[in-house]
Amino acid sequence: MGDVKRIRNFCIIAHVDHGKTTLSDRLLENTNTVVQREMKEQLLDSMDLERERGITIKCHPVSMIYRDAEGEEYLFNLIDTPGHVDFSYEVSRSLAACEGAILLVDAAQGVEAQTLANAQLADNQGLVLIPVLNKIDLPGADLERVQRQLEEILAIPADDALLASAKSGEGVDDILASVVERVPPPKGSDYVNTRALVFDSEFDSYKGVICYVRLFSGRLEAGADALLMSDGRRTQIKEVGRFSPEMVPVPALEEGEVGYVVTGIRDVAEVKIGDTITLASSPASEMLPGYKEARSMVFSGLYPLDTSDYAKLKKSVAKLRLNDAAFTFQPETSAALGFGFRCGFLGLLHMEIIQERLRREYDLDIIATYPSVVYRVTTTQGKVLLIDNPLEMPEVTEIESIEEPMIKARLHAPNDSIGDLLALVTEKRGFCDHTETIDETRVLLLCDLPLNEILVDFNDRLKSITHGYGSMDYELADYQESRLVRMEILVNGDPVDAFSTIVHTEKAESRGRALCKKLRDILPRQLFKIALQAAVGGTIVARETIGAVRKDVTAKCYGGDITRKKKLLEKQKAGKKRMKQIGNVQIPQEAFVQILKNTE
């Protein structure tokens, strides 16, 4: 496609489960990109996990040829983006490669937290928005209310919104026609040198790293020497092509097009997302404005259940890292769990998906420690340490202050659950900045919360309080000083490193008591009493005792003087005391699994 004016680059953005992938299926059908016999639901979702859960995890580009009513041909480059808050960095980089975005809104659910966040992201990047009300065939669709929300919350005129049903295919032709009308073609660049933005990458064991690129100026062809501008790395381009939706090689990629470049580089970490590719023979002088690099927000230790699987786990996390640049890992050891890895994730869903993929795709039984965030610790010597593992926390006497990461959360919820929501936010050490009324049934709460507090069960509780109608979106704010301490669990006086956590001083006692109670029910009884204690520094804040297994030593006494029985019981008591002094409690692996599966 030589004519830039015939190219349209756009993406689909929406809240989770508002029908992005279904709409992209219909677009592929209507443009005859995929023949009917090869069509299946969620065609662009390649992972089993994506298809099963109905979520998009990675963005999926595809090129389509569209003929309008006059028979004119256009090249459409569509990028289907994820909707979950964990993957908002995927969305931001997809937007950098587009000129327009279809903003999908569920006609029954209305504008949700992620709809607002993604619309603002697109607006900040200067994209043209095409609002589409999807699922209009549902009995619960309320078009008037949703159109009013579009105007009031997103400041988009209701008349601009197109009505469609991605499931039945109604209104899809109108969407395709409006892409031609409303989305501008790629701007002709005055820039002479070749510049292509890398917005994603994947690893192929035969071809090496495959970069997904959008060409802003010049052209790229196979055989040319390319230069990665962030670190000056040179590589030869082995192949270029388009997605339709499989990779189809083409002789060259022209200005304004979206496609892929096979580099032959063997390590995905060497190709940074947001990097600029230029030609080594005539390099560009400045990079394209990319976006921020993905930062790990949540950390957790992953260990194999069977210690002999460590080598297999090592190989598996390295392979996963090849296709997911946002996932980081480094080796660590634990006295209780053996060898494993400290892994960094974008958020809880990302963590869940990585663990699920390790279990399924690599057939591994793994155990994950309690998720933690990055704390900023200032020592008495004035050093600033970044700590994501409770075991690395310095002694209490060496700490000047501890700061924890905060988030700004937007909670969309029905009016009648506002009281319970405020109570939940307060319980999680947060506070509500202000509330806005969206319409007569929904409100928007703007809250500040510690990231650590929303890790485990915040989303589940939000859903149960709002009967499934609540939604949340958040972004990282600043660090804030807080009274945090490291809490250890002692079993028979010995600390167990796998159960160490960093908690707020107010919550140490309740968390410690809950952990000790759970351990008391799970750990097997021994021949002597076992003390389970939660300790903060040198102070014990909670305690439970596991009773001893007793042998009836008086069974052989039938009658006779009571002193005989007393003598035997005293002897047993002394033996148990001696046993306790030298006794060693081995915690079985199942206990770790049970505790760490439901720590909260």
Image (cartoon, grey):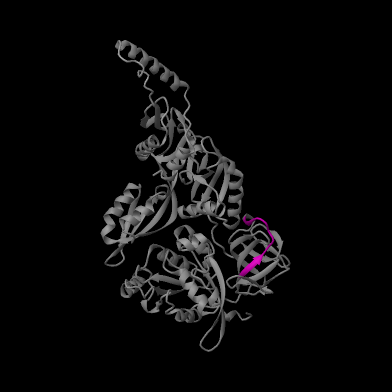
Residue 486 point in image, percent of width and height: 44, 37
Compare residues 520 and 20 and report the one nearer the observer.
Answer: 520
**Most extreme residue toward the front, as rendered?**
558
Residue 542 point in image, percent of width and height: 36, 33
Compare residues 420 and 30 and report the one nearer the observer.
Answer: 30
Residue 264 on the magenta segment: yes
Side (left or right) of 283 relative to 385: right
Magenta-tinted stretch = 259-268
Residue 404 point in image, percent of width and height: 44, 45
**Residue 379 visible from this viewpoint:** no
Vertical side of 60 occupied by 474: above or below:
above
**Residue 47 visible from this viewpoint:** yes
Q: Residue at the spot x=43%, y=31% of the render?
A: 490
Side (left or right) of 204 relative to 175: right
Vertical side of 258 occupied by 451: above or below:
above
Compare residues 590 and 153 and report the one nearer the observer.
Answer: 590
Q: Residue at the spot x=51%, y=71% of the render?
A: 40
